């Protein structure tokens, strides 16, 4: 017989497993799953863990690969390990004298809370029950354990609908006038267990197996299979976890928190998972099993109360908490059980946390020298910074709502941010309203289950009436950055009537509600929200470290002084893109712009430009003041002129209507008016038709327009330099950078530079003031990238317009494609990701590399930036840094995100 | 004193000039101009050339650079050279005893016939005239020489309108009943000269200078200045000659062909410039000056008659003709004068010729071992091959026109091809009608002048009533490939009445005429034209040599069997592009295609596809048969579907009309019909709106469409393979190549390849026949070029769609831009050339190089072609070869052009 693979490791064989996995901790976690590896690690650390063993992820993969067959040797190794656990526990599985009960839990490499299956109390059958009652003298506990086993085995292993078990229990509670199952008599529980067995037999078509070994084997298989369950797959898709990893299975001696009032069970974090405060935070229940805490079925007690209730155990727990955090160098999420006064640590893992908590914990731990600053920076996902910019309620609006009695209740503030939406009472409705109908939705449930994740992802916010800080709803909401309030006990959510009741007040499904994830308040109606300042001291500190660490600049795209000021407050170090045409769309300016475009006489055109000049000058002066001392990159007009005129269709429709009215017109005055209206529109339509292009994106815009309509760009340059002279006179330090869009050939740049520099010089002479400025170009056309060496002769800086560059490099019109084939491509896997969200390295990135290398060959100090939307995307920032850009420029709210992403890119190198 | 530059070389100092120029013949021509270098060369060869010297092009450039001042030393060198010419001629300039007369002629590096100025008979004044009459005893000649000098000096040097000199002369002729100036009496000529002097003084504001030295100096300056005259600049722009070259000036002893009946003057080619026949061809006049021949003022006599008239001189001339052709290894265009029985060779240069003549001469000369085959191939511009495809009149149409008495006259067939157009009597009208109004124009003039070139370029053909084979009209027409007939003596073109008279027949300006440049016939009315076969034996031979020489393939773009057969006849070696959608536009198919697109039920769509299948199969079978044994590359559907539907505007307008009619409808049946019509169009408009894209070029087309509408591409692939099986059964050798358009990402190609190869396999299984085929892709999107290495994994061949690749690389929508800014860019020099006509090396070419290198890295035998319009452009062919393409594919008529261009590219290397 050849030696078979090792599929099973006892918790105290962690060192062997580590060697087998290749030595690294990450590989060990991959082999044993996070939970298994941690149980082994805790065992190695001397933390009291109930004896047990881990079946490896490789065994799961082999099982699934072989179509649901245990690989060779696995079962023998399991039986062997059970024997060793029996020895360690001094109990025997299936034995009536010292019966050993086991738990069977999933444990993948990456935590997937509640997504896979667990069976507890394995090993109970009629004989063992009798024996156990005798041994413990606690029939209530034993029958409760039995009915739990039957229920879990029935639903998890045999696929019986979990809801079926609720009715009998409710009946017993009602009959006994009991509020909770704990108040039921042992006889009731025994009867319930018997009924549960009948339910299983009826619905599964087979009896509940009394053989402990069969129970164990079937449970292991069920956990293996749950890896490919729908909700697990959905979760992995949402969380970006690889589907090939498999789950490990942990078989562990059962300990019981429900063995009386000297028993308890709880979950706790080593620091506050919502705020990051350095204090143990969690929930516990006396005389309960762990699932009671997690499922949020019973109202939990704050962990602090354990210090009063069982001070020695609390101190012991706090000690383990400290040493585990020290060991793992991260905040820990722990499960424990106290069985008749003995503390057992059941699990530890890195704790999930809100973005706020993540930032505070990382900063605190760096300050405590537990981790380095680089580690602290790497601990925060750039997107988490974004949650600091989540909308908050405007205080007045909230005050008014409170005064109006709109407050429905207060729950646990488990995930920050304000959310407003129509209330939906299940995940499918929430998803349909949000995704298909584009409505803002708040999903409200008594509690959430893994099956609800799709609705939670679709919703703007989550409310539950039950559950604690570590409930499923809280964990998922935190992870995905959804504002959430849980455990709002005042809410009665009636799923049959599709209403939510608070006392006598009734809110129907589809009505507006608002929730404040920072305070836990729930309101009826639509409260006003605003985007907050980034005044969190820990974030400020972290971003300060990021600024020290990063080696590329973070600039902003801003068209108005208000945007510029906001971005500067967020840490922007310059303006990388001002779209001058955005100013033309202002309602007071559009008519002037239209006059300029449709003028038939040069004099009329010039008059319109003369009107625009002081307005643009004012725009630029405002930007210069807001960015005093920093660079302001102003891109000259880019879009085709027809964008400023009414659309062809609009005019055509108006004309059709007018002509139809003409045929019906009766009196002369009306006729006259209609004819005049028709004439005006026909004239406008003519101009629109003249300007119409079959592919406007590739048409007369950017520098092409600048060359064909030189008066327009000259006016813009004049406005820039007049504004610069004006504010410089006030003492403002100005650094204008004039940027030419859509260049494809060096001659365009050369020609524009000559014309525009002449205008700049003449303004400076008129004003008798020298303004130091730079001249540069966008690179947004593939040819510009290919010929960047030539462009660099006339450009002191270049900025990649990665939106257009992606469009042209891919030959994709974004507006058309994102409503069409592009989404289908991403959906069916033809494209891994949307190239408009994350820079395409192989195509666009390769062009950028050519451009940067070429440009710097000609001009070694060529300044290079990017100013497309990619400038705020962490992956794109890392790529840009690798390619050698000097700065990224992004919208103001992305500036803090980009600061952190840039630091992480520098750390990763 | 420092040594000054040498500005002047005597004809017999050609060796010194060559050394000064750097040794090469090209540099020598650049320094002395073509004429000057040739005069020197002829002198060196012992050909009798009147003594003289050349002022270098450098002197001209220096003169113009210094704002019209002779550079230091020039004038001294001129005077010194005059002294040496005097010694050689045994005459003295300005001397009354043995007076020397000089000519002053321009001579640039590249011949610009008639574009710059000449002054003859310099050195005449009252004293010299008297002396000369005494010496020659020929007052007629002397006074004629005088009036010519005054006229030429007046117009050329002093800017007096040349037309002013015509009236007095006409008056004298009328009074003397003389047909030509030669019949005027010496006294009349003397009086005419006196009147000319008065005209000069009156209109120039200064008297004609009697000082010979002043005459010479002023003439030299006038020639210098003429380099920058408007007509010279226009010519250079049209002919692509550099404006910086400058002209040389040749000062030469005058010899006179007008010294009586033993004197003559003429121009002749060493071979026939129209047909290429190896026989001297030209014109001469007895007792005349050279300009009489060139200007076409007097009816010239064919050179053959000189053999009878002056047999010894003719033999002597024929000898020089042979030796000059041997020396220059090219057909020569020579000017000669016989002065009182002595033959002087005044000029030789490579002769201009028609394309037909060029081909025959090159082939003959190669066969004579005068030049190599490579030289013969290099002698023909690829565009000249194109003229072989010029339209010819359909014989029946011409016969019918002749029978109807439409023949207006017969002239000299100086430039081949048939042309039809409305007659225009001056260059401005011709240009306006042709360029602004898009009309086909024939320009008809008594004779043409350099000022007329813009009209000649705009016209389809040229007719003159005067002038010979070497007249201005003939030269220009030949060079620019315009069909032309000159010297149609029967035509009386009345510029005042704007009519053309032939006897009593009158043709008004704007009426249609037709000309046959092959036969010299002119017809009234519109004759039918056709494109000829390439059955010229010399061309066939030359293209055969080209095929041996070239190292890339020449394929064709053909959508129909007829196109394919034509291209194969033209020498195409395969089909590089069949646009399958072109077949969809056929009137019998478009309704089916529209049904397929607008179908709401899948069954309807499938039914339409089922109808299209046999039609496409027939298309492909026809192509395979026509290309038996050669590759046929079939590109699957490329354009967006909305191209097959009526336009949005069209439908909107129809709807507007219908709705207006609806308001006026009176009876119920009409109302009903209108409502039904409206409904149909509204439904169609809805589909059109659904399919509408803001930038269709970058939208749902090509492979994207293939992926989104898989049934359509599957139908096409099925049609290809069913057709291939069908014709293979007939014994046809088929090589289908399936080409996927618009790929931007390797996954598109991979996905399509799987789907389509499955379809191909199933057809082959159904038909039980194996067809060897290849699968490949277009490269027309920049990203495809950047990632060609990835594509090459799934493509056996790639073909550059250089039209789209240029559009996307430049970010230019060709349709929009060529009607707008692109033309303006080319006009104002921002772009040197249209990138859609000639491949842009720096941008598009650089991308192609990346693609080819990348693709061949992954698949060393990757076949690479180009199939954009650039495939027929000689410069683009040379670039493509340099980049490593295996074949170019072009429209059928460009195939012969491409064969020669490819050979030339191989020769140049």
Image: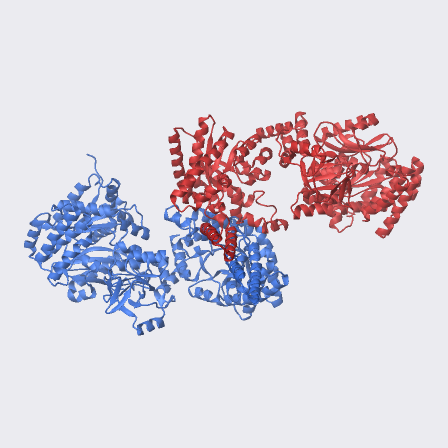
Chain colours: A red, B blue
Q: In this view, does A247 lie to the left or right of B179?
A: right
Q: In which quarter of the image is residue A537?
A: top right
Q: In this view, does A846 lie to the left or right of B603?
A: left
Q: Where is residue B487 in the image (x, y as percent from the top left)?
A: 24, 64
Q: Residue furthest bottom?
A: B403
Numbered label tally:
0
- Which residue is found at the position 59% from the left and 57% from the top? B709
Q: Quadrant of residue B65?
A: top left
Q: Position of residue B47 (x, y in %)?
A: 19, 55
Query: Against B1, is B131 above or below?
Result: below
Query: Which sits in the foreground, A560 or A83?
Result: A560
- Which residue is found at the position 43% from the left and 33% from the top? A721
Q: In this view, does A445 lie to the left or right of A203?
A: left
Q: Position of residue B358 (x, y in %)?
A: 31, 60
Query: Against B534, is A251 above or below?
Result: above
Can residue A242 be seen by looking at this rendering? no
Query: Against B207, is B892 above or below?
Result: below
Q: Which corner quadrant holds the C terminus of chain A?
A: top right
Query: Against A628, is B7 above or below?
Result: below
Q: Where is residue A606 in the image (x, y as percent from the top left)?
A: 40, 41
Q: Which residue lies furthest to the front in this view?
A: A667
Query: Which sits in the foreground, B516 or B25?
Result: B516
């Amino acid at each position: 017989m050849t030696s078979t693979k090792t599929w099973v490791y006892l918790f105290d064989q962690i060192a062997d497993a580590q060697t087998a996995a290749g030595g690294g901790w990450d590989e060990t976690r991959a082999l044993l799953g996070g939970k298994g590896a941690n149980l082994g690690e805790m065992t190695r650390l001397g933390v009291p863990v109930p004896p047990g063993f881990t079946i490896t992820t490789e065994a799961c993969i082999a099982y699934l690969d072989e179509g649901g067959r245990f690989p060779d040797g696995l079962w023998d190794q399991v039986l062997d390990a059970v024997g060793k656990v029996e020895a360690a526990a001094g109990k025997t599985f299936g034995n009536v004298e010292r019966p050993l009960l086991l738990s069977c839990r999933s444990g993948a490499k990456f935590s997937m809370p509640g997504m896979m299956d667990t069976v507890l109390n394995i090993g109970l059958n009629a004989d063992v029950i009798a024996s156990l009652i005798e041994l413990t003298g606690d029939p209530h506990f034993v029958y409760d354990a039995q009915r739990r086993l039957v229920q879990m085995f029935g639903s998890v292993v045999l696929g019986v609908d979990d809801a079926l078990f609720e009715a009998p229990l409710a009946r017993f509670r009602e009959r006994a006038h009991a509020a909770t199952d704990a108040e039921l008599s042992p006889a009731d529980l025994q009867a319930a267990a018997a009924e549960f067995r009948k339910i299983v037999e009826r619905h599964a078509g087979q009896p509940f197996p009394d053989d402990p070994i069969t129970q164990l084997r079937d449970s292991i298989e069920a956990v293996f299979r749950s890896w490919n369950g729908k909700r697990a797959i959905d979760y992995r898709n949402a969380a970006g976890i690889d589907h090939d990893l498999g789950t490990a299975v942990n078989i562990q001696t059962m300990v019981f928190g429900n063995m009386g009032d000297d028993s308890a069970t709880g979950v706790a974090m080593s620091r506050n998972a919502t705020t990051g405060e350095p204090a143990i935070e969690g929930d516990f229940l006396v005389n309960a099993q762990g699932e009671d805490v997690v499922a949020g079925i019973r109202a939990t007690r704050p962990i602090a109360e354990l210090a009063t209730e069982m001070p020695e155990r609390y101190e012991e727990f706090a000690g383990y908490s400290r040493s585990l955090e020290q060991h793992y160098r991260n905040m820990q999420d722990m499960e424990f059980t106290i069985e008749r006064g003995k503390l057992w640590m059941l699990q530890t893992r890195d704790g999930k946390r809100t973005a706020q908590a993540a930032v505070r914990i990382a900063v605190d731990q760096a300050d405590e020298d537990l981790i380095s600053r680089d580690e602290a920076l790497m601990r925060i996902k750039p997107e988490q910074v974004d949650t600091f910019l989540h909308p908050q309620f405007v205080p007045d609006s909230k005050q008014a709502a409170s005064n109006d009695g709109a407050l429905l209740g207060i729950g646990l503030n488990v995930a920050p941010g304000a959310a407003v939406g129509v209330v939906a009472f299940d995940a499918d409705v929430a998803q349909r309203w949000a995704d298909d109908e584009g409505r803002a939705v708040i999903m409200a449930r008594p509690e959430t289950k893994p099956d609800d994740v799709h609705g939670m992802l679709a919703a703007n916010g989550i409310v539950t009436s039950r559950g604690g800080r570590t409930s499923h709803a809280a964990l998922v909401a935190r992870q995905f950055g959804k504002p959430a309030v849980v455990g709002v006990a005042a809410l009665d959510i009636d799923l049959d009537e599709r209403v939510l009741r608070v006392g006598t007040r009734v809110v129907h499904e589809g009505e507006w509600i608002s929730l404040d994830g920072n305070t836990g308040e729930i309101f009826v109606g639509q409260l006003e929200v605003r985007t907050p300042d980034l005044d969190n001291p820990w974030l400020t500190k972290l971003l300060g470290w990021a600024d020290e660490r990063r080696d590329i600049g973070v600039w902003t795209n801003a068209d108005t002084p208000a945007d510029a000021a906001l971005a500067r407050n967020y840490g922007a170090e310059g303006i990388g893109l001002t779209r001058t045409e955005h100013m033309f769309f202002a309602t007071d300016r559009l008519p002037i712009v239209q006059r300029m475009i449709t003028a038939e006489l040069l004099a009329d055109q010039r008059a319109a430009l003369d009107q625009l000049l002081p307005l643009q000058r004012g725009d630029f002066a405002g930007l210069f003041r807001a960015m005093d001392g920093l660079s302001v990159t102003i891109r000259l007009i880019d879009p085709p002129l027809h964008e400023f005129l009414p659309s062809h269709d609009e005019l055509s429709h108006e004309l059709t209507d007018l002509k139809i009215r003409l045929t019906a017109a009766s009196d002369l005055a009306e006729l006259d008016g209609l004819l005049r209206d028709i004439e005006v529109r026909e004239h406008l339509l003519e101009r629109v038709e003249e300007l119409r292009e079959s592919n406007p994106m590739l048409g007369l815009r950017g520098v092409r327009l600048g060359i064909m309509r030189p008066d327009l760009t000259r006016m813009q340059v004049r406005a820039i330099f007049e504004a610069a002279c004006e504010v410089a006179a006030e003492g403002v330090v100005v650094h204008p950078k004039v940027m030419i869009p859509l260049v494809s050939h060096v001659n365009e740049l050369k020609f524009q530079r000559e014309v525009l520099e002449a205008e700049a010089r003449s303004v400076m002479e008129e004003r008798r003031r020298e303004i130091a400025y730079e001249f540069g170009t966008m690179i947004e056309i593939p040819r510009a990238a290919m010929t960047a060496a030539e462009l660099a002769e006339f450009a002191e800086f270049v900025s990649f317009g990665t939106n257009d560059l992606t469009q042209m490099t891919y030959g994709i019109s974004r507006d058309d494609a994102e409503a069409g084939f592009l989404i289908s491509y991403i959906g069916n896997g033809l494209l891994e990701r949307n190239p408009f969200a994350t820079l395409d390295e192989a195509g666009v990135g390769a062009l950028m590399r050519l451009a940067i290398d070429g440009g710097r060959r000609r001009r070694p100090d060529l300044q290079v930036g990017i100013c497309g939307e990619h400038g705020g995307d962490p992956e794109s920032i890392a790529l840009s840094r690798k390619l050698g850009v000097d700065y990224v420029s992004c919208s103001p709210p992305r500036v803090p995100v980009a600061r952190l992403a840039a630091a992480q890119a520098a750390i990763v190198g």
